[in-house]
Amino acid sequence: MKILSALQTREADAQTISEEGIASDELMERAARSFVGWFENKFTPERPVCIFCGPGNNGGDGLAVARLLHHRLFDVQLYLVNDGSQTSQDFQLNLERLPHEVPPHRITSKNDLPVLPDKACVVDALFGTGLSRPVTGLYADVINWLNEHSTCTIAIDIPSGLYTDKQTPAEGAIVQADHTVSFELPKLAFFLPQHEPYVGEWHTVPIGLSPAYLSEAKSNSHVVTQDEIQHLLKPRTKFSHKGTYGHALLFCGGYGKIGAAVLAARACLRSGVGLLTVQTPAVGYDALQTAVPEAMLIPDSNRKHLSKLPESVEKFNAIGIGPGIGTERVTKTLLGQLLATTDAPLVIDADAINLIASSDKLKAHLPKGRVIFTPHPKEFERLVCQSKNEYERLEELREFCSVYECYLVLKGSHTAIATPQGDIYFNTTGNAGMASGGTGDVLTGILTALVAQGYTLKEACLLGVYLHGLAGDLAKEEVGEISMIASDVIQHLPQAFQHLRRA
């Protein structure tokens, strides 16, 4: 699923209108019906609805929604906010279509602000995706008042005041929505942590935009959906054996952090790898042999830290390194030797990222086209740079992957997966319960297993991140968000694979 810019959204509307030979108000009516369909499934007519409309086409959407909700027996109160700005043609047309039972109340100053009914649903239809300047004056007063007084706010298409695909100026007011119902596709703004207070839960509703336009539109931002992911999962053949599904090597663990090795190893095995070898400091030998009997183990000659490459490193199909390894000098030397000698694809996480971030020499030895980095935001800052905002961070992410010809999985809500070609894919699985120590180690194990089985690095990133989040969602159903730990994610990996297989 592509993410379109504000300009492309307008072009999609225009091409749809042209291809179908309809008037613009007919597309607006289609959008309003889709919004109302979603609204009816969420709220009952017993709950009053207060709709606040601006003077443009987003306000026209709000007027059409008011009429349709009234016909469905909702108690609708309508407020038109205008500081003297000219109204759009489709706004005016939908204003004329209002039934007399829904009289519009005009707000031209702060003194006109109403008292909201108890438990009212507020529908934000002030400004849409065409906004190009910060919201100030009367509109800002209304937005700030709504943010203070509304207990449930639903934004039509995008929260008013929020820019679609660039940084919103700090001086502008922005609606703090509980739900945002976007037409056809989500907006780039929905996937950035800085916008969580404004977007709330986002939803998409179809409005029949031109399939030809959506197919041909160029975009380097995408949404990962189950429909696309389920086709990546490879079937197993009847006469396959453990050698068919690859041999992975994990460099994990250090004194006090052997648990990271256990988590990564268990996740790797649960993700279908045929054979797994784990190299860990000698102190972790007993723990790993007991906790992960299915894995083979190479105890490092150093008791507390990883220090030497194993013999015959070339036999492994994929190598994961980083969880719990620390940043000791001997470990840094091992990492440098690995980068310089191995031909296997690498999944680099945690302390291995920190070691590379601290050394231009290690960066220079990164093998082109064979690396997946999996940083959390702080590790990303060390590896790449600090950014002023999330839009700038996305551009830094694209540039880094292009320069080093690598893949990077920037972990978080809607994990961003970047490719050497400059594309970014936003994941749609996972939840806040996964904000717990060890879940990143689990992801390292999953990705290493998938690469070892022959998935391309891009396929492994897309499928692995989706499965990781899906396992977390399945764990949430059983243990909730607050009590979830990394082991819960591993325990639900089989169900996540089964879910995709059944789909």
Image (cartoon, rainbow, N blue to C red):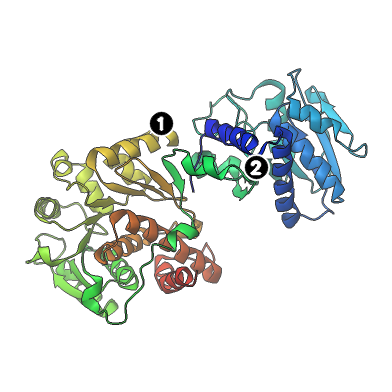
**As drawn, which residue projects farthest toward the right?**
100
Query: Residue 272, relative to residue 436: is it above or below?
Result: below
Q: Residue at x 37, y 45 (%)?
A: 377
Disc 2 target residue:
177
Residue 388 has which mark?
A: 1
- Say few, some or many: other residues with alpha carbon within 10 Å of mark 2 (under 14 / 14 to 19 / 20 or more): many
Q: Residue at x 58, y 22 (%)?
A: 133
Secondary structure state at the residue bearing disc 2: loop
Relative horizontal placement of residue 477, taking residue 355 as reference (left or right): right
Residue 179's x, y, as percent?
A: 65, 47
Count the numbered circles shown: 2
Relative horizontal placement of residue 14, taking residue 298 as reference (left or right): right
Q: Amino acid at mark 2?
A: Ala
Relative horizontal placement of residue 11, taking residue 459 as reference (left or right): right
Question: What's the distance in space between the residues labelled 1 and 2, CA to CA?
Answer: 24 Å
Q: Can see residue 41?
A: yes
Residue 218's x, y, as percent?
A: 44, 38
Please identify the quarter of the rendering in which residue 106 is found: top right
Residue 224's x, y, as percent?
A: 46, 53
**As drawn, which residue projects farthest toward the left?**
311
- Say few, some or many: other residues with alpha carbon within 10 Å of mark 1 (under 14 / 14 to 19 / 20 or more): few
Earlier-in-chain disc, 1 versus 2: 2
Please identify the quarter of the rendering in which residue 302 is found: bottom left
Query: Residue 227, relative to residue 199: is it above or below?
Result: below
**As drawn, which residue projects farthest toward the top?**
84
